[in-house]
Image (cartoon, grey):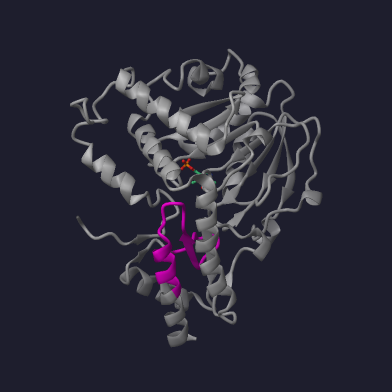
Amino acid sequence: MQNRVYNFSAGPAVLPEDVLKEAQENLFALPGVGMSILEISHRSKTFDKIIDEAKADLRSLLDINDDYDLLFLQGGASLQFSMVPVNLMPPKNKADYILTGSWSKKALKEAKRVGAVNVAATTESENFNRIPKQEELKLDPDASYVHFTSNNTIFGTEWHTEPNVGNVPLVCDASSDILSKKIDVKKYGVIYAGAQKNMGPSGVTLVIIRKDLLERSSDSLHTMLNYKIHAENGSMYNTPSTFGIYIIGLVAKWLIKNGGLDAMYKTNKEKAGLLYKCIDESNGFYKGHALPDSRSLMNVTFRLATEELEKKLISEATAAGFDGVKGHRSVGGLRASIYNAFPKKGVEDLVKFMKEFQSKNG
Ligand SMILES: *Cc1c(COP(=O)(O)O)cnc(C)c1O
């Protein structure tokens, strides 16, 4: 097998090696089926079993009860920026959005096409280096829902507890931290996540939706934009991303086998802790973008004194087998995305590399 480098990409991102190997082994023909996952009908018994098991395993990992439906849709998290408001904003046509980065701004942009949107809080003037505090939120108790982004992939900040929104349904874009830790799903109306950060390949989006909210979807909506129709058809109104769902299923089994989300969370804290420690102990050589109490366990963002030094570090790191560490242009510097499947050894090696770089260039 070809050598693999350490993949710090923000997404599509690293997947568990066991999952890749199993998918590779069975790609030519699924055991006992004689056809590839890429060739079978989404209406077949084989696929029924794959999608049902994926849902059951996700339900068990996240402790999701029967008040919720699980949908596998397409169009990425970006289509959810539109589906959420067209389905959930009427009839009041007003919603609260908490802005903590580029993705929540994009969600807001689509919501504005549907109704009146209140920015309940924003940290944009601080270049989104922190999560707003509860007392900063200016929530409308009569809003149709409150939208927030649980992990800000670009800026490297993460909510460590959900905003408290009373009885208004809470809607969360969890694309880049879903399955990284346990959450109390009962606090949410909708959770959506593109698979390609922490769950699987691109091309499939998980939507967890409280069933009573499906009643808000109007019959006048375009069919493919209607949550209720997708729910009634078990995510098979049209052909779903069969391969994507298959891989999500394998990832869910891998998570269960490795101790579930509590074990994942513990490892994620250790991995991120190593990098933040290196940043904090560098005497200012490395400067973290996120304020300490808002730091993400998934995306660690930091800068150096000059762009020249950043370029040098990125190119030396890439040459040494640390791929994808260049930061997003809106923050600059570096970003290490260390999702569930990213090995702890890779973080340890990066830290060693960063320390050596500092001693040569500090
Ligand atoms: C990557 C990302 C998106 C966009 O996902 P697509 O699947 O490309 O539409 C949205 N929100 C967050 C938090 C992301 O990290």
Which x, y percent locates residue 289?
A: 60, 66
Residue 117 point in image, percent of width and height:
71, 36
The residue at the point 72 percent across, 44 percent down is: 163
Near-viewer residue (160 or 228): 160
Q: Nearer the viewer, residue 265 or 247?
A: 265
Q: Residue at x 39, y 61 (%)?
A: 324
| Residue 349 magenta | yes
Q: Nearer the viewer, residue 318 or 27?
A: 27
| Residue stretch in magenta | 326-351
134, above or below 75, in the image: below
Q: Would you identify the image quadrant in which residue 63 lies?
A: top right
Instruction: Tell which residue pokes out farthest to the top in this image.
Output: 219
Q: Position of residue 93 (x, y in %)?
A: 71, 26
Instruction: Tell me where residue 288 sits by quadrant.
Output: bottom right
Residue 169 falls inside the magenta stretch: no
From the top left corner, tell me how far across and down residue 55 is, in percent: 46, 29
